[in-house]
Amino acid sequence: MKKCLLLLLMLLPVFGFAQEETLKGFYKDVTTAINSALLTRAGSIEISGLAAYNYEKTKYNYNAESINHLLQIEPVVGYFFFDNIALGLDLNYTYQKSKFSAISRSFSNSQTYAGPFAKLYFGDERFRPFVLASYLVLTGDIYDGGQADLGGGVLYHLDGNIALNFFAKYGLIWNDNTTVDSKSHIFMGLGLSGFIL
Protein backbone atom coordinates (compact mmCIF):
# COMPACT_ATOMS: atom_id res chain seq x y z
CA MET A 1 0.00 0.00 0.00
CA LYS A 2 2.85 2.38 0.86
CA LYS A 3 4.44 1.69 -2.53
CA CYS A 4 1.18 2.49 -4.37
CA LEU A 5 0.74 5.71 -2.39
CA LEU A 6 4.36 6.70 -3.06
CA LEU A 7 3.94 5.97 -6.79
CA LEU A 8 0.76 8.09 -6.93
CA LEU A 9 2.51 10.97 -5.17
CA MET A 10 5.37 10.78 -7.66
CA LEU A 11 2.99 10.78 -10.65
CA LEU A 12 0.84 13.67 -9.37
CA PRO A 13 3.17 16.43 -10.71
CA VAL A 14 3.24 14.71 -14.12
CA PHE A 15 -0.59 14.73 -14.30
CA GLY A 16 -0.63 18.35 -13.13
CA PHE A 17 1.88 19.35 -15.82
CA ALA A 18 -0.10 17.50 -18.50
CA GLN A 19 -3.29 19.25 -17.34
CA GLU A 20 -1.54 22.65 -17.47
CA GLU A 21 -0.21 22.02 -21.00
CA THR A 22 -3.67 20.91 -22.14
CA LEU A 23 -5.20 24.11 -20.73
CA LYS A 24 -2.48 26.24 -22.38
CA GLY A 25 -3.15 24.58 -25.73
CA PHE A 26 -6.90 25.01 -25.31
CA TYR A 27 -6.48 28.69 -24.38
CA LYS A 28 -4.24 29.29 -27.41
CA ASP A 29 -6.72 27.56 -29.74
CA VAL A 30 -9.65 29.59 -28.37
CA THR A 31 -7.67 32.86 -28.53
CA THR A 32 -6.59 32.15 -32.12
CA ALA A 33 -10.18 31.35 -33.14
CA ILE A 34 -11.48 34.58 -31.56
CA ASN A 35 -8.72 36.71 -33.12
CA SER A 36 -9.28 35.01 -36.47
CA ALA A 37 -12.98 35.87 -36.33
CA LEU A 38 -12.23 39.51 -35.43
CA LEU A 39 -9.56 40.23 -38.07
CA THR A 40 -11.93 41.40 -40.79
CA ARG A 41 -14.70 42.97 -38.70
CA ALA A 42 -15.95 46.52 -39.28
CA GLY A 43 -13.55 49.04 -37.75
CA SER A 44 -10.42 46.90 -38.22
CA ILE A 45 -7.42 48.14 -40.20
CA GLU A 46 -5.26 45.89 -42.39
CA ILE A 47 -1.66 46.90 -43.10
CA SER A 48 -0.01 44.64 -45.67
CA GLY A 49 3.41 44.36 -47.18
CA LEU A 50 3.46 42.43 -50.42
CA ALA A 51 6.33 41.39 -52.63
CA ALA A 52 5.61 39.73 -55.94
CA TYR A 53 7.11 38.57 -59.18
CA ASN A 54 5.27 39.55 -62.36
CA TYR A 55 5.65 38.12 -65.87
CA GLU A 56 4.30 40.39 -68.60
CA LYS A 57 4.07 39.96 -72.37
CA THR A 58 3.31 42.88 -74.74
CA LYS A 59 2.42 42.56 -78.44
CA TYR A 60 3.21 45.60 -80.57
CA ASN A 61 1.46 46.75 -83.74
CA TYR A 62 4.64 46.18 -85.80
CA ASN A 63 4.72 42.37 -85.26
CA ALA A 64 7.09 42.37 -82.36
CA GLU A 65 6.74 41.52 -78.71
CA SER A 66 8.50 42.13 -75.44
CA ILE A 67 8.87 39.92 -72.41
CA ASN A 68 9.21 41.63 -69.06
CA HIS A 69 10.19 40.37 -65.65
CA LEU A 70 9.19 42.60 -62.76
CA LEU A 71 9.83 42.69 -59.04
CA GLN A 72 7.09 44.60 -57.28
CA ILE A 73 6.95 45.91 -53.70
CA GLU A 74 3.43 46.83 -52.62
CA PRO A 75 2.47 48.35 -49.27
CA VAL A 76 -1.33 48.37 -48.80
CA VAL A 77 -3.53 49.93 -46.09
CA GLY A 78 -7.23 49.06 -45.85
CA TYR A 79 -10.06 49.96 -43.49
CA PHE A 80 -13.00 47.60 -42.92
CA PHE A 81 -16.10 49.78 -43.33
CA PHE A 82 -18.28 46.65 -43.06
CA ASP A 83 -17.57 43.12 -41.83
CA ASN A 84 -15.26 41.42 -44.36
CA ILE A 85 -15.21 44.43 -46.75
CA ALA A 86 -12.09 46.61 -46.84
CA LEU A 87 -11.43 49.73 -48.90
CA GLY A 88 -8.01 51.31 -48.97
CA LEU A 89 -4.93 52.62 -50.70
CA ASP A 90 -2.58 50.49 -52.78
CA LEU A 91 0.94 51.82 -53.43
CA ASN A 92 3.43 50.06 -55.71
CA TYR A 93 7.02 50.38 -56.76
CA THR A 94 8.14 48.18 -59.64
CA TYR A 95 11.57 47.43 -61.05
CA GLN A 96 11.36 46.01 -64.55
CA LYS A 97 13.82 44.27 -66.87
CA SER A 98 12.65 43.83 -70.47
CA LYS A 99 13.81 42.09 -73.62
CA PHE A 100 12.48 42.91 -77.11
CA SER A 101 12.15 40.33 -79.90
CA ALA A 102 12.65 42.97 -82.62
CA ILE A 103 16.12 43.84 -81.36
CA SER A 104 18.67 41.97 -79.33
CA ARG A 105 18.64 44.41 -76.46
CA SER A 106 17.32 44.52 -72.94
CA PHE A 107 16.81 47.43 -70.57
CA SER A 108 15.52 48.21 -67.10
CA ASN A 109 13.27 50.90 -65.60
CA SER A 110 11.14 51.73 -62.59
CA GLN A 111 7.45 52.57 -62.30
CA THR A 112 5.32 53.95 -59.45
CA TYR A 113 1.63 53.07 -59.02
CA ALA A 114 -1.00 54.41 -56.58
CA GLY A 115 -4.76 54.01 -56.27
CA PRO A 116 -7.78 52.64 -54.42
CA PHE A 117 -8.62 48.98 -53.85
CA ALA A 118 -11.53 46.93 -52.50
CA LYS A 119 -11.23 43.50 -50.88
CA LEU A 120 -14.01 41.09 -49.89
CA TYR A 121 -13.25 38.24 -47.46
CA PHE A 122 -15.41 35.13 -47.11
CA GLY A 123 -15.93 33.59 -43.67
CA ASP A 124 -14.04 34.07 -40.44
CA GLU A 125 -11.92 30.94 -40.21
CA ARG A 126 -8.15 30.59 -40.09
CA PHE A 127 -8.07 30.01 -43.89
CA ARG A 128 -10.14 32.77 -45.48
CA PRO A 129 -10.60 33.23 -49.26
CA PHE A 130 -10.92 36.73 -50.69
CA VAL A 131 -11.48 38.58 -53.96
CA LEU A 132 -10.06 42.00 -54.76
CA ALA A 133 -10.25 44.79 -57.31
CA SER A 134 -8.03 47.83 -57.75
CA TYR A 135 -7.43 50.77 -60.05
CA LEU A 136 -3.94 52.26 -60.12
CA VAL A 137 -2.59 55.44 -61.68
CA LEU A 138 0.84 54.84 -63.27
CA THR A 139 3.78 57.20 -63.52
CA GLY A 140 7.41 56.37 -64.23
CA ASP A 141 10.42 56.27 -66.53
CA ILE A 142 8.62 55.07 -69.67
CA TYR A 143 4.92 56.00 -69.61
CA ASP A 144 1.96 57.30 -67.64
CA GLY A 145 -1.44 55.63 -67.64
CA GLY A 146 -3.76 53.38 -65.64
CA GLN A 147 -4.18 49.77 -64.57
CA ALA A 148 -7.29 47.82 -63.51
CA ASP A 149 -6.82 44.54 -61.61
CA LEU A 150 -9.15 41.72 -60.54
CA GLY A 151 -7.96 38.83 -58.44
CA GLY A 152 -8.31 36.58 -55.47
CA GLY A 153 -6.44 34.63 -52.89
CA VAL A 154 -6.41 33.11 -49.43
CA LEU A 155 -5.56 34.70 -46.10
CA TYR A 156 -4.00 32.37 -43.51
CA HIS A 157 -4.18 33.61 -39.92
CA LEU A 158 -0.85 32.80 -38.28
CA ASP A 159 -1.26 34.05 -34.70
CA GLY A 160 -2.46 37.14 -32.87
CA ASN A 161 -3.08 39.86 -35.45
CA ILE A 162 -0.68 38.51 -38.14
CA ALA A 163 -1.68 36.68 -41.34
CA LEU A 164 -0.19 35.55 -44.66
CA ASN A 165 -1.84 36.41 -47.99
CA PHE A 166 -1.43 34.17 -51.05
CA PHE A 167 -2.90 35.91 -54.09
CA ALA A 168 -3.09 36.20 -57.88
CA LYS A 169 -4.45 39.05 -60.01
CA TYR A 170 -5.05 39.70 -63.67
CA GLY A 171 -4.76 43.26 -64.92
CA LEU A 172 -5.27 45.40 -67.99
CA ILE A 173 -2.91 48.33 -68.52
CA TRP A 174 -3.39 51.35 -70.76
CA ASN A 175 -0.88 54.10 -71.26
CA ASP A 176 0.23 57.05 -73.36
CA ASN A 177 2.69 54.94 -75.40
CA THR A 178 1.29 55.00 -78.97
CA THR A 179 3.19 51.92 -80.18
CA VAL A 180 1.44 49.53 -77.75
CA ASP A 181 -1.74 47.78 -78.96
CA SER A 182 -2.52 45.97 -75.72
CA LYS A 183 -0.89 45.19 -72.42
CA SER A 184 -1.94 42.82 -69.65
CA HIS A 185 -0.35 41.01 -66.75
CA ILE A 186 -0.70 38.14 -64.31
CA PHE A 187 0.49 39.03 -60.83
CA MET A 188 1.14 36.37 -58.14
CA GLY A 189 2.59 36.87 -54.71
CA LEU A 190 2.81 36.28 -51.00
CA GLY A 191 2.17 39.03 -48.48
CA LEU A 192 2.23 39.57 -44.75
CA SER A 193 -0.69 41.39 -43.10
CA GLY A 194 -1.01 42.97 -39.68
CA PHE A 195 -4.43 43.88 -38.33
CA ILE A 196 -5.33 46.63 -35.88
CA LEU A 197 -8.56 45.60 -34.18
Image: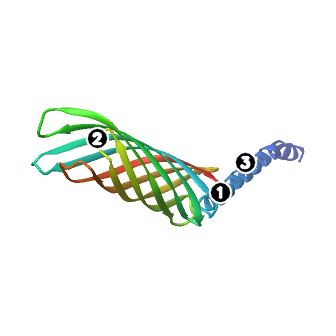
Q: How is the image coloured?
A: rainbow
Q: Position of residue 82 (x, y in %)?
A: 59, 67
Label 3 or label 1, whichever lies nearer to me, is: 1
Q: Residues within 10 Å of mark 3 (few under 14, many from 20)?
A: few
Q: Secondary structure at mark 1?
A: helix
Label 1 or label 2, whichever lies nearer to me, is: 2
Q: Secondary structure at mark 2?
A: loop
The C terminus is located in which quarter? bottom right
176 left or right of 189?
A: left
Q: Position of residue 172 (x, y in %)?
A: 30, 57
Which residue corresponds to the image point at 32% horizontal and 51% vertical from the top-left? Answer: 145
Q: Secondary structure at mark 3?
A: helix
Tell me the distance, in whole angstroms, between the alpha carbons under discs 3 and 2. Answer: 59 Å
Which amino acid type is shown beneath numbered disc 3? Glu
Which residue corresponds to the image point at 74% horizontal and 53% vertical from the top-left? Answer: 23
Q: Quadrant of residue 135?
A: bottom left
Q: Is residue 8 above or below residue 154?
A: above
- Mark closest to the chain's N terminus, 1 or 2: 1
Residue 35: assigned label: 1
Q: Is residue 180 above or below residue 72?
A: below
Q: Is residue 122 above or below residue 57?
A: below
Which amino acid type is shown beneath numbered disc 2? Ile
- Give the residue number, with chain letter if any, for mark 3: 21
Residue 142: assigned label: 2
